[in-house]
Amino acid sequence: MISCFECGRTELFPTRVEMQGSVRGEEYRVEMAGFECPSCHYKTIDGTAMPEFGRLLADSYRANHGLLTSEQIRERRRRLGLTQQQFAQRLGVGIASVKRWEMGKIQERHSNDLILREAGSHHCNFAAMFHAQTNAGNIAIAVLQPHSSGSVGFIDFLAASTACGTAERESTVPFDSPILKAGEAILV
């Protein structure tokens, strides 16, 4: 066992720990396997767990900003029955990009939209997308665009800035609904 680095009085014991870290200037807390001192409650993780810590932090950032997490990307690829190489070819990106995204590197918004468009998404977290827009002081608008396959279409998320009165397209995601009609706008 390892003696506590903080107090040196007792040995650290394995447990679930909550660790804090920063991603792109934003603080996040994640829970993972680690060690805690029963005397001073110092918490740490094993050095080999650092990549997982980074992935969990990145996924927290992704979820907060309406981006697919590493597991969601991996799940979409697996649902399609594709290898990373095949998935990369389908998306028109290099295999290194797919590997990085699945290991925790945060994808850009346009790459996220590409994954959603090419790998399908009937379970998009619309609430997270609207939350990200409205927290930025914007009015979030979604417009369902028609698609040739019937009720399946694409939702264009627009961010209408209340500060300067402008609107710009933030992202496009696939959507399937027999209820909404193409071209209907949802104002949140």
Image: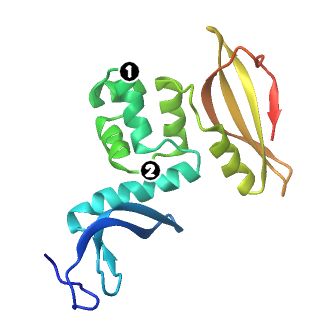
- From the top left corner, tell me how far across and down residue 35 is, in percent: 27, 71
Q: Is residue 92 in sight in this rendering?
A: no
- From the top left corner, tell me how far across and down residue 112 is, in percent: 51, 38
The label number, if any, that marks residue 155 in the structure image = none
The quarter of the rendered structure image containing the C terminus is top right
When asked about the image quadrant of residue 55, the answer is: bottom left
Lower position in the chain sequence, tag 2 or tag 1: 1
The quarter of the rendered structure image containing the N terminus is bottom left
Residue visible at 34% across and 81% down in the picture: 42
Q: Which is nearer the eye, 151 or 4? A: 4
Q: Which is nearer the eye, 35 or 146? A: 35
- Determine the secondary structure under disc 1: loop
- From the top left corner, tell me how far across and down residue 16 is, in percent: 34, 64
Relative to 28, say whether 4 is above or below: below
When asked about the image quadrant of residue 142, the answer is: top right
Q: Which of the two marks, 2 or 1, is nearer to us in this view? A: 1
- From the top left corner, tell me how far across and down residue 99 is, in percent: 30, 41
Instruction: Say which residue label 2 marks.
Output: 106
Q: Is residue 173 left or right of residue 6?
A: right
Residue type, label 2: Ile
Between marks 2 and 1, how big is the CA–CA gap?
22 Å
The single residue placed furthest to the left in the displayed view is 1
- Determine the secondary structure under disc 2: loop
Instruction: Say which residue label 1 marks.
Output: 80
Relative to 18, say whether 110 is above or below: above
Residue type, label 1: Leu
Residue visible at 37% across and 35% down in the picture: 74
Number of numbered discs overlaid on the protein picture: 2
Q: How is the image coloured?
A: rainbow
Q: Is residue 72 left or right of residue 138?
A: left
